Amino acid sequence: MDDCKKQRLSLSSKFKNCKNAFVALGDETRQNIIIALLESDKIGMRVGEITNKTYLSRPAVSHHLKILKEANIISMYKKGTMNFYYINANKTIWKEIKNLTDNVYDMIQNASSWGYPNENQE
């Protein structure tokens, strides 16, 4: 098997590992929730605070938080009876995404030598 095929198979495997994260991150509403969490002046926001920032209903926010949580993009901590959501600092998913993008970049560096057309060339 040639280098190009090996790299494409490796890239495919890494992409599959990141698929749930990409699905979660690919939705504009969830992107707005992530932005709200990142722009917050504290670590963790309650559902009501997120609804105020995103202008979404509580059920909609809860639905999207569940998807982000299942993808390990966000986490939740409890303080008494209150739930606070925050960007997950677990490095695993972020490292997988970084490895994928690094591999895409490496493959692009070799693409022309493997016969892929280069759109920048006339």
Image (tube, grey):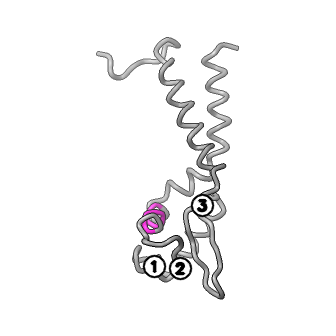
Say above or below: 45 vs 118. Answer: below
**The residue under label 2 is which amino acid type?**
Arg
Whole-angstrom CA distance, mark 2 to mark 1, is 9 Å
Circles 3 and 2: CB atoms closer than 8 Å = no
Residue that protrudes farthest toward the bottom in the picture: 81
Q: Specify start and end residues of the magenta stretch as a single range.
A: 31-36
Viewer-proximal residue, 45 or 68? 45
Instruction: Decide whether the magenta segment is chiefly helix, strand or loop.
Output: helix
Report x, y in % for residue 38: 45, 64
Mark 3 vs mark 1: which is more N-terminal?
A: 1
Q: Which residue is mark 1?
A: 51
**Nearest to the observer: residue 46 or residue 7:** 46
The residue at the far right in this view is 1
Q: Are marks 3 and 1 in contact (CB under 8 Å)?
A: no
Q: Amino acid at mark 3?
A: Asn
Observer-nearest of 9 and 49: 49
Marks 2 and 1: which is nearer the front? 2
Crowding at label 3, few (<14), some or many (≥20) Cα neighbours within 10 Å? Answer: some
Read off the residue under disc 3: 88
| Tag 1: amino acid | Thr
At label 1, counting other C-alpha atoms closer than 10 Å, the crowd grade (few under 14, some 14-19, many 20 or more) is some
Left/right placement of residue 117 relative to residue 64 reads: left
Q: Quadrant of residue 68?
A: bottom right
Q: Give how far across and how far down residue 88 sits, in percent.
A: 60, 61
Instruction: Give the label, 3 or 1, closer to the camera.
Output: 3
Q: Secondary structure at mark 1?
A: helix
> Which of the image's four quarters has the C terminus?
top left
Judging by the rendered image, the residue that carries numbered circle 2 is 46
**Disc 3, SS:** loop
